[in-house]
Image (spheres, rainbow, N blue to C red):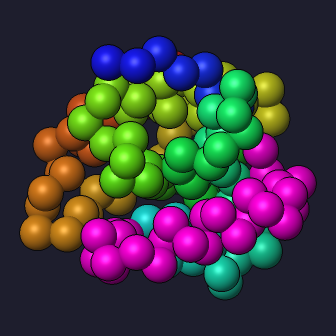
Amino acid sequence: MITMKLKIVPKNELTKEQLEYIEERLSIPKHQFDGGPPNVWSIYKQGLFAFLDTESSIPIGLVEASGPNDQIAPSWWLDIRYRGKGYGNEVVDTLACYLKKQGVTGVGKIQIKTHQGSYDETSISLAKRFKKHFE
């Protein structure tokens, strides 16, 4: 497993190159059935963020976080290149820390629905880990 330090950047603060990279990665066939942030990346104007590798500034994933501060309901997405490599824990830990700094105090219902359930078990585990940050 590779160690990577992540940071969260709001969509409107990403560079043109980072936005183009994200669009390119979202368009590959392996992401065709991905849910969550990819479904709203081109639609929503707020609540969208990218996870960046702090060394390379390459986006490795996305997050959509909406709802009131006491009932935030985030969803996250990782590029297929980074799935199954242990980044999920770092993603949710980084997200929880970021949202706490933004005034978030509680978690609402986190929807889990991956294509054919392929990542449901992992996503459920990550949602539990995320919620523990706010207990």
Q: Quadrant of residue 83?
A: top left
Q: Where is residue 41? Give x, y as percent.
A: 62, 73
Magenta stretch contains residue 102: no
Percent of width and height locating residue 31: 35, 70
Q: Observer-nearest residue: 134 or 81?
A: 81
| Up/down of 47 relative to 83, above or below | below
- Along the viewing direction, whichever of 33 and 123 lies nearer the viewer: 33
The spot of residue 4 in percent (x, y) is 53, 21
- The residue positioned 80% from the left and 35% from the top of the image is 102
Q: Which residues are magenta?
A: 8-35
Image height of 85 relative to 121, above or below: above
Q: Confirm whether the magenta stretch covers residue 17.
A: yes
* Residue 104, percent from left and from top: 70, 35
Q: Residue at x 37, y 47 (%)?
A: 81
Q: Is residue 113 above or below residue 61?
A: below
Q: Which quarter of the figure has residue 126?
A: top left
Q: Is residue 49 left or right of residue 88?
A: right
Main SS, magenta residues: helix
The quadrant of the rendering that contains the N terminus is: top left
Disc count in the image? 0
93 vs 11, left or right, is: left
Q: Is residue 20 visible?
A: yes
Of all residues, the one furthest to the bottom in this rendering is: 43
Position of 97 compared to 61: left or right? right
Above-or-below relation of 50 to 102: below
**Does residue 105 appear anywhere in the picture?**
no
The residue located at (54%, 46%) in the rendering is 60
